[in-house]
Image: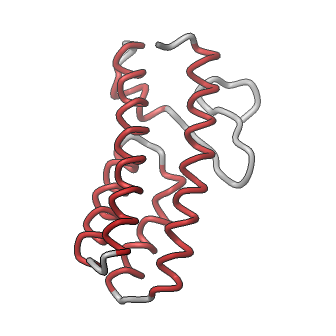
Amino acid sequence: MGDDPAKPAVAGPIELDLTAMEELADGDSAVLADLIATFVRHTADAIVNARAAIGAGNSVEAARIAHTCFGFTATIGITAMVPTLRQLERAVRHDHRDETIHLLAEWERQFELIREALRAWKDRSNLT
């Protein structure tokens, strides 16, 4: 990780590699900033919606949310959350309530770490 701006330092076991997002942005810092903002907004909304679906006992919707989120997250290269999201999707589909609650909390924890790392990276990179 070190001082490489493409790999923000993150407390805990999460590493980020923004290479995929940088490639998608094709050198355009505004597009990169938009991809990061979209990831943050999409994930924050997904967590809220997954929590509501789980609370309402709507396992189909909760599984769909987790699946969609891990697809989007993997596509932009933020793969640290993918294993948790896949496990969450399975736990919800198999009605493993305790595991589902644990994985939802883990997803939120990972997202907060990633959001902070992205914020720090954007600040260092002077992205708007």
**Residue at the spot x=34%, y=43% of the render?**
42
Q: Is residue 10 left or right of residue 67?
A: right
Q: Does residue 117 lie above or below 48 as drawn? A: above
Q: Position of residue 20 (x, y in %)?
A: 42, 35
**Residue at the spot x=48%, y=51% of the render?**
79
Q: Is residue 13 left or right of residue 86?
A: right
**Residue at the spot x=32%, y=83% of the render?**
93
Q: Does residue 95 lie above or below 66 as drawn? A: below
Q: Is residue 59 left or right of residue 55?
A: left
Q: Position of residue 56 (x, y in %)?
A: 31, 76
Q: Is residue 128 left or right of residue 60?
A: right
- Nearest to the observer: residue 37 or residue 8: 37
Q: Position of residue 110 (x, y in %)?
A: 58, 54
What colour scheme does the image use? secondary structure
**Residue at the spot x=43%, y=65% of the render?**
85
Q: How many marks?
A: 0
Q: Quadrant of residue 86?
A: bottom left
| Quarter containing the N terminus | top right
Q: Position of residue 124 (x, y in %)?
A: 64, 16
Q: Does residue 14 lie above or below 29 as drawn? A: below
- Nearest to the observer: residue 104 or residue 57: 57
Q: Quadrant of residue 76?
A: top left
